[in-house]
Amino acid sequence: MTSAAAKGSAVCMRAYSARPDSARDTLPGRTKVTVHALKKMHSDGKPIAMMTAYDYPTAVACERAGVDMVLVGDSLAMVALGHQDTSQVTMDEMMHHSRAVARGTRSAFLVSDLPFGAYHADIGDSVRNAVRMVKEGRAEAVKLEGGRHFVSRVDAIVNSGIPVVGHIGLTPQTAVSLGGFRVQGKSVAAAQHLVDDALALQTAGCFAMVLEAMPSLVAETITRLVSVPTIGIGAGSRTSGQVLVMSDMMGIFDRFTPKFCRRFAELAPQMDAALVQYKTDVRARRFPEEGLHTYAMPAAAEDRWREHVLSAYGLDLDRVAEPTAQVHQQQHQRSSV
Amino acid sequence: MAAAAKGSAVCVRAYSARPDSARDTLPGRAKVTVHALKKMHSDGKPIAMMTAYDYPTAVACERAGVDMVLVGDSLAMVALGHQDTSQVTMDEMMHHSRAVARGTRSAFLVSDLPFGAYHADIGDSVRNAVRMVKEGRAEAVKLEGGRHFVSRVDAIVNSGIPVVGHIGLTPQTAVSLGGFRVQGKSVAAAQHLVDDALALQTAGCFAMVLEAMPSLVAETITRLVSVPTIGIGAGSRTSGQVLVLSDMMGIFDRFTPKFCRRFAELAPQMDAALVQYKTDVKARRFPEEGLHTYAMPAAAEDRWREHVLSAYGLDLDRAAEPTAQVHQQQQQRSSV
C-alpha cells in the first residue's frame, strides 16, 4: 500500500472491478494457439472450439475457459449493437470491438470479421481493410464471407501475409440475396456449389473455413474433401470444429434461441432478477447499507462539520430530512385508509 | 410462405437477438422525463439509475424498469479493457450510446461526455453535447467537475440539453486526485463539495451524481440543493443511486468495489458455460445430430452419397479416417 496509508491517515480507495490483470487470467501453462497448433489439432482429429466475443469481458471469459479460437464476429451488429442485421456495421466499429477483444485475449487465436462492404468493391479495398483489421483491430487473422467469387480477394490478402478464414453456406451479410436466414445446400446441385466453394477457397489460401447452416452430410463431405480445418455452426458434429454466438449460448436474450444452438447458461433471468432487486432495494433505501457500502469522515471532522453546516446554512443534520418525513407521514396515512 | 407451401421445407436459422427485444418494456410503463424525475424527487422516492454500455445491457435495464440509464465512460474499463477512463473518445462514447439507445424505450437516457470533450473551451463543450444528443441519441449529458465547469454547464443547458453534474471522486481526473480516493473527508474538502454542488445547480444542472464521499457530506448536499442527487459510494441519504452494471452483476470475478453490492454472480456461470461448451465440442457431444442439425431431404441425400462417391471417390458411408485414427490411438493409450 502507499506511504499515505503508512502515515496513519486511512486512504479509502474505490475503483472499478475491472482490472487489466484480468487479461492475464489465462489457464496456467497454456501456450499461444497458432496456425500451426490449429493445423496439428486438425490432423490429430481433435475438435477445435471457437467462440465469439465482442468486448473485453467476453474476451476475458473466453480466455479463462481456454477456447482455441476467438472470433470477433459481425454478429455483434445484432447482439451487441441492436441492429436488425449485420450489414450496417462499419470497419471502424468492427475494429473498435476487435481492439477491445484483443485487450482481453492472451493465448487464444484471434480472428475478426471483415464487415459487409469492406472486401467487395475491389482487391485493393480488401487488402487495405484486412491490413487495418490487423494493424488497428489487432486481429491475427480475418474472416470474410463468400465462395468462389471471392477467391481473388482471399488470394490477395493471403499473399500480403494475413491468414484468412473463409465462410460459406449461409452468409449472413448477404442473407437478403439468399431469401433470408435459410439453410443452404439442401439439394444435390446446391451442395455441389458449396463443395466447389470450399475447394476454391482452399486453393486461394484459406487456412480454415466456417461452414454455416447446411446439412450435416454436406458439411462432412466438405470436411473430408479439404485439407484445412472446417469450423461448423449449424453444420453438424462431423466438422473439424465448432463456433457459436456467445449471446445465444449464454441465454442473454430470453426470447429466441436458434435451433442449432444450445444454451449452456441462462443469464437473462439472472440479470433481470439482479436489476429488479437493485431497484427494489434502492427504493426501500436498503441499498447502500450504511457502514458496509459507505464512507465516513473521521469522527472529529464529522462533529465539526455538523456544527459548521448548522451555523453556515441553518441545516440541522441531526434532524431527519423533511422529504423523507413527509413520505413516512403519507405512508402512515395510506396504511390507515 | 410460398416456398414452404410448395412442399420443400424451409429451414430458417437466425440469431437470438431480435429488435423486438427493445419493446419488452414493462406493460404500461410511461416514459421517464425530467418532470417525472423531479416528481420522484419531491415525493422523496429514490431514483434508480444503472449503467449500460451496449444493446443487451440496455434491454436488461429496460426490462427491469430502472428510471435512468447512464452510458458511463466507465465502459472504457469494464467494456473496452482500458486502464482508466481517460482514453475513450467521443466517437467511441457515441457508438456505445447509440447501441444503448436502441435498447432503451422508457428509461431516461444520460450519456457521459468523455475526458477532453468539454475541457478546452465552451464551443467544444456545446458541440460535443450536441453530438452526443444528435449522434449518440442521448437525452441528457453528464460531465465531471464542480465550480470550474459552471460556464460549460451553463452553455450546454442554454442550448437546450439537460445536464447531469458529477462531483466528488471524478474518475476522469483521478490522477490529479492522487488515485481513486474518497473525497470530502475533511471540513474544508466537504465545504468545497457543497460549493461545487450549489454552483452546478445555479448553472442549471437538473441532477447531479455524488461519487465516493462520506454519507454525511452527501446528505448535506442533498438537503441543501433543490435538484436530485444520485449517489455512488455516497450513502443512502441521496435522492437516488447508480452503480456500474459490470460490478453489481459480478462479471469480473476478482474485485468488487467496497460501495458496490453484487446482485448476481455471472462470472462463474459464464466460465462454467464456456468450459462445458469446449468440453462438449471436444467430445463431439455438441452439436447433437437431429437436435441441433439440418438434413437434406432423404431422396437428395441418397443421390448426394452416390454423386460424391463417383465424383470424388469419397465413401460417405464409411467413417472419416482421422476419427478412426483417433479411436485407435485412444485404444492404444488406454491399454498402456
Image (tube, coloured by chain):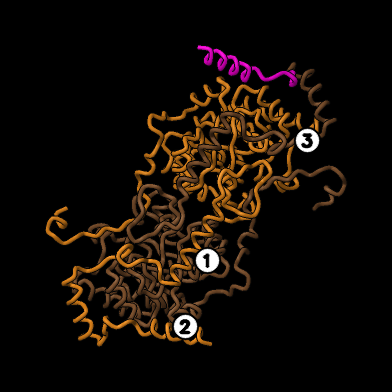
Chain colours: A brown, B orange
Residue depth check, mark 2 versus mark 3: number of the one nearer the observer: 2
For numbered disc 3, what is the local secondary structure? loop
User: Is any atom of residue A54 visible in this view?
Assistant: yes
Q: For the point 38% across and 29% down, which residue is it?
A: B28
The image position of residue B296, as x and y in percent, is 22, 69
Disc 1 secondary structure class: loop
Query: x, y percentage for residue A267?
Result: 47, 50
Which residue is depicted at the point 56% across and 56% down?
B268
Instruction: Please provide percent x and percent y for residue B66.
Output: 50, 35
Residue at x-position 41% and y-position 43%: B102
In the rendered structure, the answer to whether residue A93 lies left or right of residue A167 reads right
Q: Chain of mark 3?
A: B
Nearest the eye: B94 or B217? B217
Marks 1, 2: nearer the viewer: 2
Q: Amino acid at mark 2?
A: Gln
What whole-number distance in Å separates the C-alpha atoms at marks 3 and 1? 43 Å
The magenta stretch spans residue B197: no
Instruction: Please state the extent of the stretch shown in magenta in the rendering.
Output: A316-337
In the picture provided, is B103 more to the left or to the right than A290? left
- Looking at the image, is A299 positioned above or below residue B291? above
Q: Amino acid at mark 1?
A: Arg
Q: Which residue is at the far left?
A: B6
Per the image, the residue denoted by label 1 is: A138
Give me the chain letter of mark 2.
B
Residue behind mark 2: B330
Query: Is residue A269 or residue B29 the one in the foreground?
Result: A269
The circle on residue B185 is 3
> Of residues A31 and A125, which is closer to you in this image?
A31
Q: In the picture, residue B284 is in which quadrant?
A: bottom left
Q: Residues within 10 Å of mark 3 (few under 14, many from 20)?
A: many
